[in-house]
Each structure stands twice: as C-alpha cells, then as structure tokens.
Image (cartoon, rainbow, N blue to C red):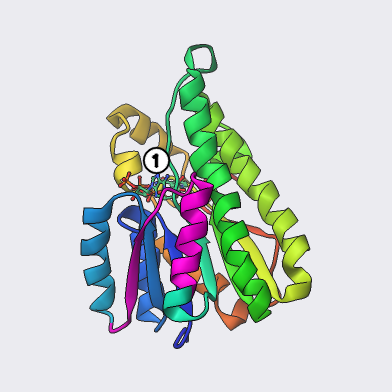
Amino acid sequence: MLKDKIALVTGASRGIGKEIALVLASQGADIILVDINESLLQSAAKEVESRGVKTLIIKADVSNSAEVEKMADQAYQHFGKIDILVNNAGITRDNLILRMKDEEWDQVLSVNLKGVFNCTKAVSRYMIKQRQGKIINIASVIGIAGNAGQSNYAASKAGVIAFTKSAAKEFSSRNINVNAIAPGFIQTDMTDGLKEDVKKQMLERIPLGRLGTSQDIANVVSFLVSPSADYITGQTVVVDGGMVM
Ligand code: NAP
C-alpha cells in the first residue's frame, strides 16, 4: 500500500519508532531512520531492510534545529522526496514540580516539543513543494489527562497536540495532513524502568486489561498515512486500551 513512498521516522533505533519503521516498511515504504544512537540505528536499519525496502540512517538530535535542517536536506537529496514524517523521538525526566530542575524541564520541552517543530518545519518545505504529505506526531495520553511527577512531559505532549491542530490548519491547502497519536501505557524501554507497583496500578486503570505494544501504535500510524485516512487531519487518536476516556 505504501510502495514508492518515502517515510522519515525520528527516534527510530528502538521502541515504538523502530516498530513504526518496520510496519511502514512491510507496506513497501523506503525508510529514513533518524536517532541520536548511531549503533542501534544501524541494527534497526538492517531489520527494516529485511522487509525488502531501502533505508537511509541519519544521526541527528531533533532538538537541534541546525542538525534537523541538515537531516531533511540529506534525506531529500538521497530519495528526491519525503512523503511521510513521523515525529516519534521523545524522552522523560520525571520529577515532582517542587523538585524539578530547570534542566529536566528544558530537556523534555526541547526534545518532545521543539523537536516536533524543528522536524515539521524542515520537512514540510519539501512536502509543500510536492503538494502532498502526511505528518504524524506521537503525543501521549499524559498530554490529555496530566500525571503527577510528569508536568514537563505532560506540558510537552499537550503542546504537541495543539501544534498538530495548528499545523493541520496551516498545511491543509497544500494537501498535507497532520495528525497525532496519543499512546497510553506501552511496553518499551521507556516504561520498563517504572517500579512494579506503579505498573500494577497502571494496569488496573486499563479497561482492556493489558499494556499496549509498539505494534498497537504502529498499526494506527500505518492507517493514518494511508489513502484511507485522506479526509482526517488535525486529530489526536488515543490508543490506550480505554485508559483515558
Ligand atoms: P524509547 O524506547 O525511549 O525510544 C525513544 C527513542 O528516541 C530512542 O531511540 C532515543 O534514543 C530517541 N531519542 C531520544 N532523544 C532524541 C533526540 N533528541 N533526537 C533523536 N532521537 C532521540 O521510547 P518509546 O517508548 O519508544 O517512545 C516513543 C515515543 O512515544 C515518545 O515520543 C514517547 O513520549 C511516546 N510515548 C511512549 C509511551 C510509552 O508508554 N512507551 C506512551 C506514550 C507516548 P536513545 O536510544 O539514544 O535514547
């Protein structure tokens, strides 16, 4: 379904980003994998190539606008177009508000929110020329419901949801759809570090009775970038087993 499409995925060396790259590749898209972790990027790219598609790996920090400009330029020079952008790279630096350090606030906002702005700005230039594109931003249910100890993360993800709506309005006349996905509690390295009692409490709040998988998120990305979703823009799809409703 995505044959001849070029997709750029940030934070693609592991977790949800890697699974998104694999699922889009399974549908025929060539993949640009972007991450700060170069050795993991190479092994992720090998896995993606085993799906029979081409890949390009680019080491870039999404919070650094100069690196992101270079990234978009390199991707465009290599493939001649960019059809799909998945803004997935994200971090947590959890702390209670009274204990939160400036760096913890700034790092999370820089990667999670400014990173989405940087990549959207750099890649949308090419999409505007092409008069088509699909942008997917990975937000979080925490950006909708909030969470004690995650004020920085919640603010960044709420920002991503508002940014998604603004970008959808700005780019709609150029045939570019911009949507967000708000995952709930997904089993990855990001959540593996949580204490067992916290995980148990989370599980009790999920009506479908299980944690999400990276594939649960990647499947929704693959729908939103497909022609079946051409009339959807500015939306946030919650994928959380019913946790926040
Ligand atoms: P993860 O396993 O920690 O993977 C995140 C990836 O992003 C890592 O490869 C990381 O590189 C990369 N990254 C971090 N900072 C970066 C930067 N500045 N520039 C480029 N790449 C960077 O996380 P995940 O669980 O897959 O999460 C992916 C996205 O889903 C994030 O936006 C997260 O907020 C969101 N999300 C996750 C959950 C969940 O339950 N897991 C729930 C809701 C939303 P390193 O390997 O070097 O760290």
- Placement of 133 over or under 150, stated as above or below: below
The residue positioned 63% from the left and 62% from the top of the image is 179
Residue 209 percent across, percent down from the top left:
40, 49
- Horizontal side of residue 197 vs 205, given as left or right: left
Say what amino acid the circle numbered 1 marks. Answer: Leu
Of 74 and 196, nearer the camera is: 74
Q: Is residue 28 magenta?
A: no
Residue 57 percent across, percent down from the top left:
33, 65
The residue positioned 52% from the left and 43% from the top of the image is 112
Would residue 238 be seen by someone viewing this image from the given angle?
Answer: no
- Horizontal side of residue 189 vs 221, given as left or right: left
User: What element does badge 1 sit on?
Assistant: helix
Residue 28 percent across, percent down from the top left:
39, 84
Of 114 and 237, nearer the camera is: 114
Quadrant in the rendering for residue 146 = top right
List the residue tagged with mark 1.
203
- Horizontal side of residue 105 vs 30, given as left or right: right
The residue positioned 62% from the left and 66% from the top of the image is 124
Residue 105 percent across, percent down from the top left:
52, 27
Q: Which residues are magenta?
A: 52-76
